């Protein structure tokens, strides 16, 4: 597989695109207004301890207090190169009651493991982890682990032995990162020294600080991507900014000089993302529907509780029997579902409604194919067996708001529902509102302003609407169209002064 990293940087924002076989699979954004917090370390103050849910809220100086679960007070045993968190298995363990471990008002060093999403504050851990190029240093741990993505048993054993050789006794724990394959002990030693030095600086800074205060900021987007991702697995990293290109080149020369020839400066007059077709492809991720090459499509619907994905054959009718047509569509959908989840950076609970298959063998094929494509994802994912309803339930690690949430706001017209009332429905709302006016008896003369589409609905389908309302309510009524109103908005204006009384009589 051919992999490439594209970097587009300006004074206001930085974008990183990951390409696989010339197809966009991941997009990452760094912008000042986003307030990136993931990986940042704070000296916080315990604001409240809640024994009922075995968790605490910690003030770290942000608008919302961070959430700290009891399972994040102790270091787990899972090998995960990102550190900080072992998932469901750790949640199942027994821990001392949180009220015995921390108290309200106590200062505590914590790290952000999940950024604020929607109405929730940041997720925190007391298990500090400092990622380097080849190692993740965990000063509060005592173990040595190897990234689960390194699967060769002999290589895992070799790397674990090397890592133990660089870790002084009682100096914390480390995890060997995926990029460390085939490296030597000297390289590990240098990386460990950098990380342990960084931790000492954090502790020294903490001595003169009052909670809540930031102690350490995680690397910016581009620096983090180069540190965490760029390796011999990538053909190129192409950058459109001279200053950023120079910074990347200097870093690569210091940690992986053999890769310096793969760092390229893009000098074309056309935007780098336009040149590679990234912009157009990314814009499609803001749509609900994603097309399949066969003519089928998937529909992606994010909700507060979960993400639902529906698979449809669309224009594709196949040439053989229906079961083979359905199987081909479902298999193609697995690839696109895995790509779209990475590209849109969606997380949490995801439910995939594939087209029903009669054959258990075909169901297994689809599930295995989905798991194969999900294995390329850097975020932790897990797909469960197909349910009796033909659904595949899965989870994907969520550490930040999706790009859809970051780049968009709820529509003022529909308030985020994606729907507006039809003109016929608005006419009935107007009718009910005028009846309320009649019952209260406080108004005599009204002007009803409405969108032109609603006025057209009345003229074409209910030409006697105003006359009938006049007879029914004994009010002086008139109506006018206003193209500045929303399609489903209307205003009720009272008297010669045309005082707006809509809020008094229209239903909320």
Image (tube, grey):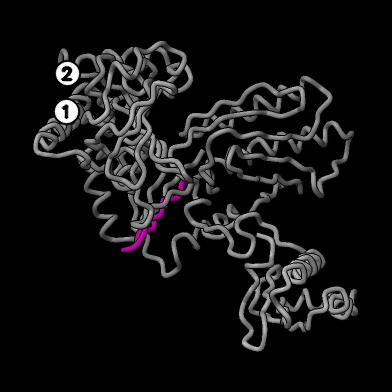
Which residue appears at 69% of the width and 39% of the height?
333
Which residue appears at 61% of the width and 44% of the height?
302
Which residue appears at 72% of the width and 40% of the height?
310
Q: Is residue 70 above or below residue 294?
A: above
Which residue appears at 76% of the width and 46% of the height?
296
Front-lying residue, 508 or 488: 508
Stretch in magenta: 8-18
Residue 113: image quadrant is top left
Q: Are dots 2 and 1 in contact, CB under 8 Å?
A: yes
**Does the magenta stretch mainly form a helix, a strand or a loop?**
strand
Q: Is residue 81 above or below residue 473?
A: above
Residue found farthest to the bottom: 496
Q: CA distance from mark 2 to mark 1?
A: 9 Å
Residue placed under numbered mark 2 in the picture: 171
Query: Do we see residue 123 in this rendering?
Result: yes
Q: Is residue 283 above or below residue 123?
A: below
Q: Identify the disc placed on residue 196.
A: 1
């Amino acid at each position: 597989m051919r992999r490439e990293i594209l970097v587009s940087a300006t004074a206001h924002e930085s974008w990183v695109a990951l390409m696989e076989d010339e197809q966009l699979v991941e997009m990452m954004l760094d912008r000042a207004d986003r307030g990136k917090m993931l990986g940042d370390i704070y000296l916080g103050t315990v604001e409240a301890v809640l024994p009922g849910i075995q968790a605490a809220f910690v003030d770290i100086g942000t608008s919302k207090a961070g959430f700290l679960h009891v399972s994040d007070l102790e270091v787990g045993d899972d090998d995960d190169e990102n550190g900080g968190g072992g998932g469901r298995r750790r949640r199942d363990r027994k821990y001392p009651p949180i009220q015995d471990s921390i108290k309200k008002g106590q200062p505590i060093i914590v790290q952000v493991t999940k950024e604020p999403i929607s109405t929730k504050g940041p997720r925190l851990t007391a298990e500090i982890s400092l990622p380097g190029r080849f190692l993740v240093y965990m000063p509060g741990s005592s173990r040595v682990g190897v990234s689960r993505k390194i699967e060769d048993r002999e290589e895992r054993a070799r790397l674990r032995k090397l890592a133990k050789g660089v870790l002084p006794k009682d100096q914390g724990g480390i995890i060997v990162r995926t990029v460390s394959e085939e490296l030597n002990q000297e390289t590990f030693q240098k990386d460990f020294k950098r990380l342990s030095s960084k931790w000492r600086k954090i502790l020294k800074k903490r001595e003169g600080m009052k909670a809540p205060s930031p102690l350490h900021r995680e690397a910016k987007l581009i620096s983090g991507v180069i540190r965490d991702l760029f390796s011999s697995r990538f053909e190129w990293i192409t950058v459109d900014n001279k200053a950023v290109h120079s910074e990347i080149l200097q870093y690569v020369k210091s940690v992986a000089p053999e890769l310096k020839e793969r760092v390229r400066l893009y000098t074309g007059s056309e935007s780098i993302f336009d040149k590679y077709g990234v912009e157009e492809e990314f814009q499609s991720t803001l749509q609900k529907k994603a097309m399949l090459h066969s003519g089928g499509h998937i529909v992606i619907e994010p909700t507060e509780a979960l993400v639902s994905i529906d698979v449809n054959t669309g224009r594709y009718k196949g040439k053989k029997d229906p079961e083979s047509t359905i199987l081909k569509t479902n298999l193609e959908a697995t690839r696109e579902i895995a790509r779209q989840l990475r590209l849109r950076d969606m997380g949490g609970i995801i439910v995939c409604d594939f087209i029903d298959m009669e054959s258990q063998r075909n169901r297994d094929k689809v599930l295995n194919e989905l798991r194969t494509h999900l294995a390329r994802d850097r975020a932790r994912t897990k797909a469960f067996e197909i349910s009796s309803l033909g659904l595949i339930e899965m989870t994907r690690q969520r550490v930040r708001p999706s790009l859809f949430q970051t780049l968009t706001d709820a529509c003022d017209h529909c308030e985020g529902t994606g729907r507006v009332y039809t003109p016929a429905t608005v006419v009935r709302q107007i009718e009910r509102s005028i009846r309320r006016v009649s019952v209260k008896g406080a108004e005599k003369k009204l002007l009803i302003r409405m969108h032109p589409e609603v006025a057209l609905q009345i003229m074409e389908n209910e030409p006697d609407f105003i006359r009938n309302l006049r007879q029914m309510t004994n009010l002086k009524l008139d109506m006018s169209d206003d193209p500045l109103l929303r399609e489903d908005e209307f205003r009720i204006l009272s008297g010669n002064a045309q005082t707006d009384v809509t809020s008094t009589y229209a239903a909320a």
